[in-house]
Image: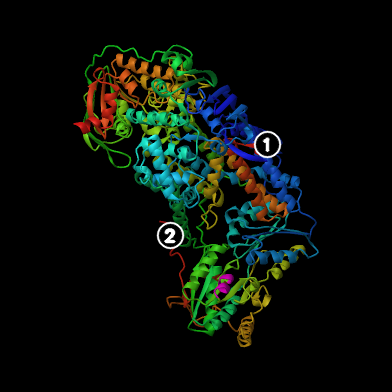
Amino acid sequence: MKPYVELKYITKRFPGVLALDAVNFNVMPGEIHALLGENGAGKTVLTNILSGRYDLNEGEIFIQGERIDPSKWSARAALDRGIGMVYQDFMLVEEHTVLENIALADLSIPFIPDFDQIRKTIADFGTKYQLDVDPDAKIWQLSVSEKQRVEIIKALMHGSKILIMDEPTAVLTPQEADELFKIVKKLAKEGTSIIFISHKLPEVFEICDRITVLRKGEYIGTVNVADTNEKDLAKMMVGREVFLQTEKAKYKPGLPVLVLKNISALSDRRIKALNNLSLTVHESEIFGIAGVSGNGQKELAEVITGLRPITNGNIHVNGNDITENTPRKAIKEGIGHIPDDRIGMGVVPDLGMPKSMVLKNYKESRFSFKGIFLKKAEITNYTKKLIKKFNIKTSGMSSPVKLLSGGNLQKVILAREISEEPCMMVAVHPTQGLDIGATEFVRDTLEKQRVDGAAILLISEDLEELMAVSDRIGVIYEGEIMDIMLTKDTTIEDLGLKMTGGSHVAA
Amino acid sequence: MWRLKIEKRLSYNKWLDYFVPVASMVLALIAGSFVFLINGANPFEAYKEMFVGAFGDGYAWSETLVQATPLLFTGLAISLTLRTLLWNIGAEGQFFMGAMAATWAAQYFSQQPPWILIPLLMLSAMVAGGLWGLPPAILKTKLKVNEILTTLLLNYVAIFFVNYLLYGPWKDPMYPGFPQTPRYPDAAILTQYFNTRLHTGILIGLVVAVILYILYKKTGWGYKIQVIGQSRKTAKYAGIRVNRNIIRVLVISGAIAGLGGMLQISGLQHKLRLGGISNNYGYTGIIVAFLANGNPLAVILVALFMGALIVGGDSLQITMGFGKGVVHMFEGMVLFFILAGESLKRYKLRWVKHG
Amino acid sequence: MITHLKKLFVISIVTVLVLMPFTQLNAGDMAAPGKPGDVKAAFVLVGPVGDGGWSYMHNESRLALKKLPYVKKTAFIESVPEGESERVIMEFARKGFNLIFTTSYGYADPTLNVARRFPNVVFEHCSGFLTSENMGNYFGRSHDAMFLAGMAAGEMTETNILGIVAAHPIPEVIRNVNAWALGAQSVNPDVKVHVVWTNSWFDPPREREGAESLVAIGADVLGQDQDSPAVQQVAQRNGLYSVGYNSDMTKFAPKAHLVSAVWDWSPIVNQIAEDLHNGVWKPEAIWPGLESGVVGLSPFGKMVTEDVIAKIEAKKQEIIDGKFVVFGGELKDQDGNIVVPAGVVPTDDELLSQYYLVKGVVGSLPGGEVRYQ
């Protein structure tokens, strides 16, 4: 069988960066092909070249054996040759119906569309690929996975022979992910090829046929799933053996640190986001919060760190009442915060690293004279020390922090928050988007904090991480904690069910 | 077929910092040559006239500095708000209020000696300018009203209020019917140097610029407002009281603009006079602050540059007989190229072969 | 931008300091007096030279002046903001001009300031009242012409509502507004004159808006004391009549234009230059009237009947002969207070500080008593 698409010796240079270095990649018809690699490995750049969004510097593109003139390769040309992208940041008009969105996207549909025809096509896809979606629903009424289906239908309507899916499960619950896998397998069976970008090895093994691994812009190799295992793949990705299993000390919780009682709070849209929520986190304990995104996790973290006022209930830290919480109070009480918005909240994005390192403690006498004049030299030394201690890779201390890779950015935040020796740490999606090396580092750091006696609230959508790291897990659903259990007494499937309100309905 | 493609620069080249402004200036001068050629003049002669008019001798320098002084103050005022990602379009009104308050103090405390009177004038001007910045600050922080609108609208209030005073209660009885106040008492007038119109205002402006520079670079407060300007979310996260500091910034910005208004009158005009207070300095200050990218030392340079452009432009009219339109066209072209060059530092243009 | 500006700043300061000849710090004493008797004249204009009105007429006088044999050089600069006029006036003085005309009331103080620095240069300020050893002022009794133009307006109105768009509420303009109203009332006692202030000499959009607002309240003849012909155009577009000011504005609104009260500065300007040439110049306040030709009327529009023209011409002669005084008593202000008692002729000083609107004018003047607390 001939590959549908073949990329040969693709090289892409950005100023000062070699993003792709002679990378080979091909996709067979009806194949599910995983593109694997750490952050910055070049997966996204490669798919952007394939879908015509980037020009390439060197290399060749073949579609069905025909050599493509690189100067004629554009997003439009890629679309015409059957290469479709399933967007992650759904490009849908929220106020319109599914039908209208699909009609809007397909350029072959005339100015005045024949909606009955489109409706029929959607229904056909529904039966053929289990892509069930109500054509007359408004987009805003849909769940995330339904929106994803609409994106897939949009791509298929355009006659795509290849679908590029960039971390499609990142936003889904395990159940939804399973359904997606069914659809993907069905599509492959009918002859559509899938390029599947993922960090999660188990799902790659579950659905993919072949795997291409990239590392720092280099092509490492392509292997058949049948001929490899998780450990080998991880080695290919990071170039060394990694142990994803975090070594954990025995669970010996101490005194309660954070006590939330009957907390309620409103979301930004003035809707009740936390509803009579109570929980306690102890010394030397990692308390995991599991939940589908948008069930109050963000608001919970903000309430504890003083960024959001509560409408009801009370908050105590080490017995001190901080019900009337503010970020200043929270910092004073020793509450550290690893925010999920690393660039927008965790650091000062356009400034050099020292400005992000002393964000919370610049007033201390070691960094300033009476809080007025800053001691530049001390701040610089302090930053240097932390860069060394946390092994942060940077092109220079004064270059904007936002240019750091995700892992190094997270290290900056960790370095700052941990150096404050917090008694309580709120970590929100601390490893999201990080590569295996950085993920390992973050988890180890949290574990070290735990051993040192800190109380840690870990909010994550990665259930494996919660299972690997937490001592106890609480499931949050619609602003309430549905269930709190010891990690050893639960399973991922159980969590997944509870996250979607399953046990709630059952009870 | 070739077409031009705009791409975001993914890396930051240091040499662009030097190359772009020089190149934009050269391009502006080349483009400006056409303006002069069309009007039948030798561009080299025109440029020489402009340069001589603005920098040709000590006197020309003094006039350029005089012209730069109010722009220095409004530029500094706006650069402070730019650092916190706020737009103070109200420097014009604050300038007027400063001039107004200084005039009040000059008349009310007219018996005081200069070493008391001048500081009193400065203080009143800063208080008045600062107060003029307060309502937008409060509306911004309490009700999230866009400060661009509120500061802009207060300009009109300030100008109408000053006009009312000039036509009404403050009108000079000895100067029949004309909307202007009596001349300041001598004790309220700043020294002019070298038998030119150069007055102490420029020195005070330089001091303010240096103070702001130190404030930005060396102090915790400067750090705080920089964080606020970079990311409100980060600032809140770090426990910085964002609203309180936004109010401070807008009030201090108003105070600086107000001080500029006082110096313009006390140093140069010596009385409040319709049409003799500000020539859109508050608005030109926006361009100054923008070009200086919020850096107070750069504001000095840009204010000087704008002053030179105005003075040199006038001398172009005087010696070469151009109309105002030609001069404005040239000035606009220079600013256009510099601003365009700024964006080229972030984006690049590339020819792409197509088809 | 920040870093390179810092560097550029240092570089440019150093360069310029090196290049700068420090010899010329003194602003004064630079003007090298040319041959005795030569005149080099400069004009500082408040609006654009093409405003079709005030500044245009001043530039016309410059063009006429240029033809005199002893006038070696003339120059002008337009649209000079009043707050920045001092530099411009000084620049002319430094460049060797020995006769400088500054043509807006707001230039008074700046002109005086520069005059003190350049005792060998003659300054002539238009529409003010200050004089010093080397500074005179000149103006004309435009209110006499405005009175005559107002007669035409009073004759032509059907609604008996007139409107006038006026620049600044200062005596110079107030006199014109009052005279215009008195002229209209002299032929049509029922007429009401509405005045709108724009607070700007030259601002065509604002002048237009002012005119439109007068049209909206039913004015059918529009007048102006503004530098642009915007008001004329509004009148023509609305099918109404208009009275111009400054220059003959016929060409801007041929169907609407009745007549303009016009300036011709040449008699004054030429006389001043000649006096300077002959070494007999003295600082004076020159304020001539209709007899001099400095103020006068443009040709009438076709719609103005011979009767009306004859009536206006007769009145003009009466004024020239001193038989009629525009602001002669008895004169009442808006509120009916007698401001000029019967039989009294106001002095020039009284006219120069006129700050009331006469009976029949609808509108107000800003202000009140002078106080500082």
C-alpha span from label 2 to label 1: 48 Å
Q: Secondary structure at mark 1?
A: helix
Q: Position of residue C161 (x, y in %)?
A: 49, 78
Q: Is residue A441 left or right of residue C60?
A: left
Q: Residues within 10 Å of mark 1 (few under 14, many from 20)?
A: some
Tag 2 residue: C371
Q: Position of residue A307 (x, y in %)?
A: 32, 33
Q: Is residue A458 visible?
A: yes
Between residues C245 and A262, which one lies in front from this camera angle? Answer: A262
Magenta-drawn stretch, dominant element (helix, strand or loop): helix
Q: How many marks?
A: 2
Residue A156's place in the image compared with A198, above or below, is below
Tag 1 residue: C16
Say which amino acid is labelled 2.
Arg
Q: Secondary structure at mark 2?
A: loop
Tag 1 subunit: C
In magenta, the rendered stretch is: C232-238
Q: Is residue B41 left or right of residue B6?
A: right
Q: Residues within 10 Å of mark 2 (few under 14, many from 20)?
A: few
Q: Residue A469's image quarter? A: top left
Q: If the image is split into quadrants, where does the N terminus of chain C sit? A: top right
Of marks 2 and 1, the one in the foreground: 1
Say which amino acid is labelled 1.
Val
**Residue C235 within the magenta-colored segment of the rendering:** yes
Q: Residue B25's image quarter? A: top right
